[in-house]
Amino acid sequence: MEEKVNHLVSWLQLKVKEANANGAIVGISGGIDSAVVTHLIKRAFPNDSFGLIMPCKSNPRDQEDALKVVESSEIDYRIIDLSETHTVLMDQIKKQIAEAGTWNDERAKLGEANTKARLRMTTLYAVANNYGYIVVGTDNAAEWHTGYFTKYGDGGVDLVPLVHLTKGEVREMAKYLGVPDDVINKAPSAGLWEGQTDENEMGTTYDMIDAYLRGETIPEKDRQIIEKMHAMSEHKRHLAAAPPKF
C-alpha cells in the first residue's frame, strides 16, 4: 500500500508540474473517495493543497464528516454553502421553462440533483483559478466503469488518481492513510437528495461491481445492471463527439 500511495503522490506532483500549476484542490464531500484524495494531495503538496466543503441542501452529517477529513489530513480548507445559489438558479429555470409550458416535474428531480454537482464543479474551478491549482477528482474504477458520476459535475475535473482502484481498494487505502473510521464505514452517497445512497440508486453493490471488474462470476441480475450502466454512460468517458471532417 505504501508503494501505491507513493506512486499516486509522485504522479500528482508530475501532472501538476506539467500543467505549470501551483498545487491541487479537491471537493471534500464527507465520503471515502474524496477523503482519500484529500490525504493524497496534502502529501503531494503539503503547502499548496486546498479542500472545499460545499454543502448544497445537504445532510448536516456530510459536513461533519468532511471536517473530520480536514482534521485527519490537516489540509487548508474553506466552506462555501451553495444552497441559496442552487435555489435561486433552479427557481429561475423552472419559472422560465414553465412559462413555455414545457416543465417536466418527473425529470426535474434528476436535473436539480445534477445541478448541485455542476455548481460544485464551477465553484472548485473558480477557487482553483484563484490559487493556480489543478482540480483533482474522486471517481474510482467502479464509478468510472458504470458512469456513476455527473457529466461536467463531479466528472468535470483535471485528474482522476483513483480511477484504477476498486471501491474495496479505495477502502484499504483510506485505512492506510488514516481516514476516520466514520467516513470509511458510512454508506456511499452522492448527497444528491435526502436519503439517497449510491447502491440503492444503482440497484447493485460496489462489492458486485468490484467483483465484475476483477473478472469474477456474479449473479446474472447484477451483471446485466452493470453492463447496461456501462453502455448507457459511454458518452461520459469521452470528450464531446464531433462529426467526421469533410
Image: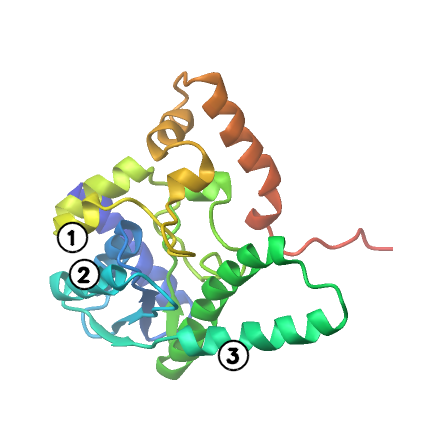
Q: Is residue 103 visible?
A: yes
Judge whether 171 appears above or below 60 on screen: above
Judge whether 38 appears above or below 7 on screen: below
Q: Is residue 141 visible?
A: no
Judge whether 141 appears above or below 193 on screen: above
Q: Which coloring applies here?
A: rainbow
Q: SS class of the residue under badge 1? A: loop
Q: Residue at x 15, y 62 (%)?
A: 68
Horizontal and vertical percent position of residue 209: 40, 31
**Pointer 1 local density, CA inside 10 Å: few below 14, some 14–19, many at least 20:** many
**Along the line of sight, which residue is nearer the eye, 108 or 72?**
108
Q: SS class of the residue under badge 3? A: helix
> Splitting the image into 4 quarters, where does residue 102 fall?
bottom right
**Pointer 3 local density, CA inside 10 Å: few below 14, some 14–19, many at least 20:** few
**Along the line of sight, which residue is nearer the eye, 61 or 159?**
61
User: What amino acid type should be assigned to the residue bearing mark 1?
Assistant: Val
**Along the line of sight, which residue is nearer the eye, 59 or 77?**
59
> Splitting the image into 4 quarters, where does residue 38 fall?
bottom left
> Tag on residue 179?
1
> Splitting the image into 4 quarters, where does residue 168 fall?
top left
Residue identifier under label 2 = 69
Q: SS class of the residue under badge 2? A: helix
Assign the C terminus to one quadrant of the image. Answer: bottom right
Residue identifier under label 3 = 88
Assign the N terminus to one quadrant of the image. Answer: top left
Toward the right, the furthest residue is 246
User: What amino acid type should be assigned to the residue bearing mark 2?
Assistant: Val
Please state if 54 lies on the left or on the right of 122 as rendered.
left
